[in-house]
Image (cartoon, rainbow, N blue to C red):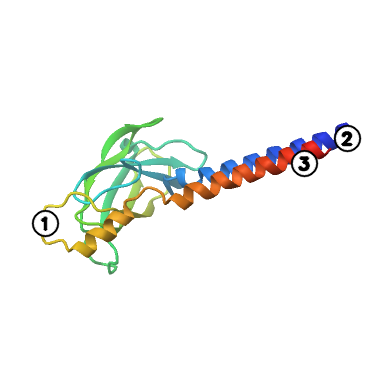
Amino acid sequence: MNFYQKQKKLKYGLLLVCLATVITMQPVLAHKVQVAADVGATLHLEPNDNPRAGEPTQAWFALARKGGQTIPLAQCNCQLAVYAQPYTPGEPPLIEPSLQPVTAERFQNIPGAEITFPKPGIYELQLNGKPTKGSNFKPFALKFEVTVAAGTTNTQNVQIANSNVAQENTKSLPIWAIAIPILALIAIAFTFVKGIRRS
């Protein structure tokens, strides 16, 4: 095997490893991103983007202008509204938590709020914002869909069938979702090693 064939096989192997890594890392990418006008936002919910009903959830929004410059809460007149799905336009929000400046990951003084979702289900978080005096971005409206799992509730009349469904929804990943990427990595590695040995 000449030098160019070895180089080609090495590039092919590296491409397969990168592809397999992207496939296996896909479930880890949990933050939700939305863009409107010249503003984008990443939503994160503690703990681990897996909010539970009846338990306080810390939500924060990493706001950024086009180009990546972070928008702190002091530069944005922002309001957050939480709606239970489905809802009718014009219906009042279920919750309107007040936003506070928070520091999370590499972001400082970004909009954040503590939210307690009343029951499991799908909710929509709507973040609306306008620039404060001296800030330079267009007004925006961002909508994030959030799935809330079962958690602690104060009501005692929860049916057994509903609790079984909620328990299934709280599992982090089914076993097949973990096994398939691992088997794919093993198959790719085996094929790559077998191809090198033949040459």
Task: Please name the residue that numbered disc 1 is placed on.
Answer: 155
- Residue farthest bottom in this picture: 88
- Label 2: element kind: loop
Marks 1 and 2 sit apart, C-alpha to C-alpha, by 71 Å
> Which residue is painted at 27% across and 49% down in the image?
79
Q: At label 2, which amino acid type do we have?
A: Met
* Snapshot quadrant of residue 12: top right
Circle 3/circle 1 CB separation < 8 Å: no
Residue 51, placed above or below residue 106: below
Label count reads: 3
CA–CA distance in space, label 3 to label 2:
12 Å
Which class describes the residues within 10 Å of circle 1: few (<14), some (14-19), or many (20+)? few
Using the image, determine if residue 89 lies above or below residue 156.
below
Q: Amino acid at mark 1?
A: Thr
Direction from residue 170 to residue 14 in the image, left or right: right
Q: Position of residue 46 (x, y in %)?
A: 31, 40
In the rendered view of the protein, which quadrant contains the N terminus?
A: top right
- Mark with earlier residue (3, 1): 1
Find numbered disc 1 in the image and state the secondary structure of the residue it sits on. Answer: loop
Disc marking residue 195? 3
Image x and y of residue 67, in percent:
52, 39
Say the numbered circle drawn on residue 83.
none
Residue 107 visible? The answer is yes
Q: Around disc 2, counting alpha carbons within 10 Å, would you say few (fewer than 14), some (14 to 19), or many (20 or more)? A: few
Which of 10 and 43 lies nearest the eye of the viewer?
A: 10
177 or 19: which is nearer to us?
A: 177
Q: Residue furthest right?
A: 2
Residue at 33% of width from left, 55% of height from top? 169
Pointer 2: what residue?
Answer: 1
* Residue 124, placed above or below residue 88: above
Front disc: 3 or 1 = 3
